[in-house]
Image (tube, helix red, strand yellow):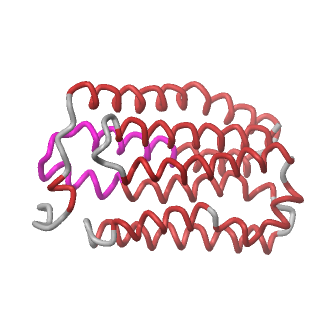
Amino acid sequence: MTVPDIHRRLFRRELSLAELLADGIVHALALVAGLVAFPILLYHALQTAGIGAFAALAVYAGGFFLMWGFSLAYNMTPPSALKWLLRRFDHSMIYVMIAGTYTALIPHLQHPGWAWTLGVVVWTGAAAGIVVKVALPGRYDRLSVLAYIALGWVGVIAIGPVSAALPVLSLWLLIAGGLTYVVGVAFYLWDRMLFQSAIWHMFVAVAAGLHFAAIAVSLA
């Protein structure tokens, strides 16, 4: 569980107290927003959409809280063997969040074949990414950024069925969320910038919010 001697994170500048505080506030706001919004969404789904949609949304909610929870723990922990262990889970939960977001939308697809295909593709990709992050920590980090983006946009393979199943507003919100995440990646890579971590996580929070809105609109 020790950090590889050549890993670039060893050469990252130490964040100031103000930067850590800003990053913690972004995480706290995201988690509080989730604690308020998800119970409302789940209650509405249980009342109007049935147990299947409720279960899919519960998976989505689980991915959200796992991602932000591990991200908060990892980013607030001082450099140590524990931080290196938390990093594996932090990066792995991004895959769970992406797959969970798709899971929330899959019940809307009217064609079972497309629903199953998209679900299998997304969760297989997420599982493969998690295996790499857990078994080979610190390896292929740059490549994993591309893997996150690719998994997030894999839904274009089913753009026809998805477009037919979702409201136009949901589609535009999903696209906006995906683009926000992609733009935010530039700040993730720009790790010498002041408040870089807080800015990156702010982009992630906005993207997650846009996707939540898309799911809420589709449910309504």
- Looking at the image, is 109 positioned above or below residue 34? below
Quadrant housing residue 85: bottom left
Residue in the image at 54% along x and 73% along y: 124
Assess whether residue 95 is covered by the magenta stretch.
no
In the rendered image, residue 89, in percent from the top left (x then y), is placed at 33, 55
Q: Would residue 69 be found to the left or right of residue 45 on screen?
A: left
Residue in the image at 51% along x and 41% along y: 203
In the rendered image, residue 88, in percent from the top left (x then y), is placed at 30, 58
In the rendered image, residue 71, in percent from the top left (x then y), is placed at 36, 44
What is the magenta segment's predominant secondary structure?
helix
Assess whether residue 64 is covered by the magenta stretch.
yes
In the rendered image, residue 23, in percent from the top left (x then y), is placed at 35, 32
Residue in the image at 69% along x and 44% along y: 54
Q: Would residue 100 be found to the left or right of residue 139 on screen?
A: right
Quadrant housing residue 3: bottom left
Region in magenta: 63-90
Q: Which of 160 and 16 lies nearest the eye of the viewer? A: 16
